[in-house]
Amino acid sequence: MSIKGKTVLITGSGVRVGRSMALACARAGANLIVHYGRSDEEAKEVHSEARDLGVEAYLHQADLSKVEDCQRLIEEAWEHGPLFALVNSASIFQDIELEDTTAENWDLHMAINLRAPMLLSQAFARKLGADEGRIVNILDWRALRPGPDHLPYTISKAGLAALTSSLAIALAPAITVNGMAFGAILPPADGGDTSGILDDVPAKRWADLDEVNQTLLFFLEGPAYVTGEIIHVDGGRHLI
């Protein structure tokens, strides 16, 4: 399987890991739907870089906390031709413990991190019909080892892990559904303290973004007999 000439939608592909994965797909010859929420300038840069690599790229804005925007994104993306793959990468990540969890910040995490991937996957599958396709959900090592920190985020990702398994069954045999659970990939975007973050990482280092990209390309280009799997790209952090 090759994604050359196929179209891939990666949510949140204007910044950070989403950007890296999008450009990796472009280097592999895939056409891109570059989605962004608020990072319009960064998304424009990804769009331009992808086109410089010789593939087609299209910019689409959507607020994934809104049901109607999720549905619109798939409809608009399909106007450029059928999609082959959906990568649910967009996420909100806030350090909120139980005592600081409110209905508002809980609902926001659930809307963007869990409901949006469900709605996008549902719409993607409906448009795809019986054609072959692939879905990759971006998780976190915390999803399978939940603790008291980052409570709304962790529970939303745990739900996404369960959704990955459920969708793998529901959408078989045409669509494979897999997940990537990240650990120490990039320092926090807000410049937060990173001291001690590698203490419980057996690999004792941050990830190389190419390691993330290789894992994504395995799911997009690898065996269609692999579905419902979650690969931890975390240097072994989930083992501690």
Image (cartoon, rainbow, N blue to C red):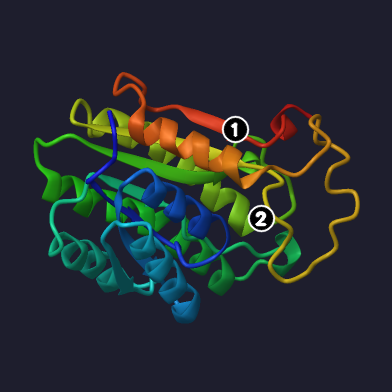
Looking at the rendered image, the quarter that the N terminus falls into is: top left
Task: Give percent across and percent down for residue 45.
Answer: 46, 73
Instruction: State the residue lying farthest toward the left.
Output: 130
Residue found 50% across the figure and 60% down from its top = 19
Task: Give percent across and percent down for residue 146.
Answer: 67, 41
Q: Is residue 62 visible?
A: yes
Residue identifier under label 2:
151
Q: Is residue 38 visible?
A: no
Q: Secondary structure at mark 1?
A: strand
Task: Give percent across and percent down for residue 84.
Answer: 23, 44
Of the two numbered discs 1 and 2 in the rendering, the one whose residue sits closer to the viewer: 1
Residue found 27% across the figure and 42% down from its top = 4
Residue 123, quarter of picture: bottom left
Residue identifier under label 1:
232
Contact, mark 1 vs mark 2 (Cβ under 8 Å): no
Pick whichever, 105 or 195, lies toward us.
195
Say above or below: 42 vs 232. below
Residue found 45% across the figure and 27% down from its top = 229
Residue found 74% across the figure and 53% down from its top = 149
Q: Is residue 180 left or right of residue 123?
A: right
How many marks on residues? 2
Say above or below: 78 vs 61. above
Task: Give percent across and percent down for residue 65.
Answer: 41, 70
Pick whichever, 181 or 65, lies toward us.
181
Q: Secondary structure at mark 2?
A: helix
Pick whichever, 207 or 97, lies toward us.
207
Looking at the rendered image, the quarter that the C terminus falls into is: top right
User: Counting other residues with Cα less than 10 Å from the Cα at mark 2, is it few (<14), some (14-19), or many (20 or more)?
Assistant: many
Q: Distance from label 1 to label 2 (Cα)?
A: 20 Å
- Label for residue 165? none
Q: Is residue 239 left or right of residue 111?
A: right
The kind of residue on which mark 2 rests is Leu
